[in-house]
Image (spheres, helix red, strand yellow):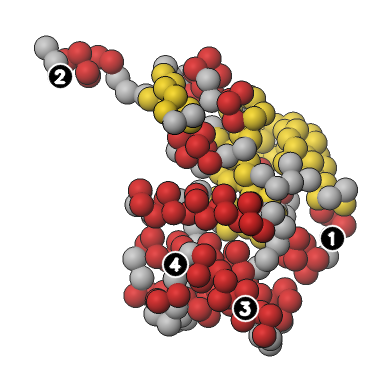
Amino acid sequence: MIKVEGLTKTYHHKVVDEVDIEIKKGEITSIIGPNGAGKSTVLAMVSRLIDKDNGTIMLDDQDIASLKSNEMAKKLAILKQSNHTELKISVRQLVSFGRFPYSKGNLKEDDQAMIEQALHYLGLTEIQDKYLSELSGGQRQRAYIAMTIAQDTEYILLDEPLNNLDMKHSVQIMKILRRLVKEMNKTIVIVIHDINFASCYSDRIIALKEGKVAVAGLKNDVINEHVLRHIYDLEIKIQEINGQRICVYYDDEIHYRSTN
C-alpha cells in the first residue's frame, strides 16, 4: 500500500494542499480532476521526482525518504507525462533501460526475458529494432510504457499514459494495465483526463480539485452526477452500458440549435 498524509507542495501558490490518500495493492487507481488540480505533482512527489514541502509518503510501511534510489527503483516505476530522448536508440534498447536497477547495464538471461515480455505486452516485438525517431507518437509512447513494465516493480505510476495515442491504442493500453493487475498482481496509479477510461478500467478513483482531495473511493462512488458536477463545474449525465457507467457531457444549447 502507498499511504500519503498531509502532502503539500507550494510554488507561487499551493498546488497540492494537505493531501491524504491511500493506494490499495493489486488495483488500478485513477487520479482525475481539472487542469491545475495537482494530479501530476502528487504523482511526482510520490515517486520522488520532485521534493515535497510537507507530509509523509509511506510505501509498504517504509517512508520513501529512507529508501536508497536503487531500492526505490525496484519497488516503484514511473512514466512521466513528457518523455524525450536525443539518443539514437532502438525500441529494444529503450525497453532494456528498465532493467538497469537490476543489471547495471550488464543484461542477463532473466533481464532479456523481462524485456521480451514487455515488448510482447505492448505489441512492439515486430518493431523492436526500429529507432525511436522512426516511430509514430503512439508507438513511441507504447515503447516508453514497455520500458516501465520491464522494470518489473510492484507499483507502476503513469502520468497521462494515453498521450499521443489514438482510440484503438488507448483501449489497448488500458486493457494491458488490467492484465498486469490480474496476471502479475501489479498496483497501478494513473493520472488520466478521460473520465470514461477511468470509469471503465479503474478499481478506485481519486478526484482532486484546487490541490485538495475532493472525493476518493470505489469508482462508482466517484462516477456519479453530483460528485462530477462538483469536481468539474459541469453538468455530466451518466448512462449505464453493459454494467459500466459512461459519462456524457455536451452543450444542450448546441444540440437544440442543430435541430431547430
Residue 212: where, in percent of width, then height? Answer: 66, 29
Q: Does 23 sit left or right of 63 as displayed?
A: left
Identify the mark nearer the N-term, 2 or 1: 1
Q: Which mark is residue 67?
A: 1
Q: Does 57 sit left or right of 236 as displayed?
A: right
Identify the mark nearer the N-term, 4 or 3: 3
Residue 95: quarter of image: bottom right
* Quadrant in the picture for the C terminus: top left
Identify the mark nearer the N-term, 1 or 3: 1
Identify the mark nearer the N-term, 2 or 4: 4
Asked if one can make out residue 53 in the rendered structure from this viewpoint, the answer is no
Q: Does 244 sit left or right of 64 as displayed?
A: left
Point 53% across, 15% down: residue = 226
Point 30% across, 19% down: residue = 251
Q: Is residue 83 above or below residue 190?
A: below
**At label 1, which amino acid type do we have?**
Leu
Q: CA distance from mark 4 to mark 3?
A: 15 Å
Q: Residue furthest left?
A: 260
Q: Which mark is residue 258?
A: 2
Identify the mark nearer the N-term, 1 or 4: 1
Residue ID for mark 3:
113
Q: CA distance from mark 2 to mark 3?
A: 56 Å
Q: Are the residues tagged 2 and 4 within 8 Å (C-beta)?
A: no
In this view, the mark in front (2 or 3) = 3
Residue ID for mark 4:
123
**At label 3, which amino acid type do we have?**
Ala
**At label 2, which amino acid type do we have?**
Ser
Q: CA distance from mark 2 to mark 1?
A: 59 Å
Residue 259: where, in percent of width, then height? Answer: 14, 15
Dot 3, crowdedness within 10 Å: few (<14), some or many (≥20)?
few
Is label 4 in a helix, a strand or a loop? loop
Q: CA distance from mark 2 to mark 4?
A: 42 Å
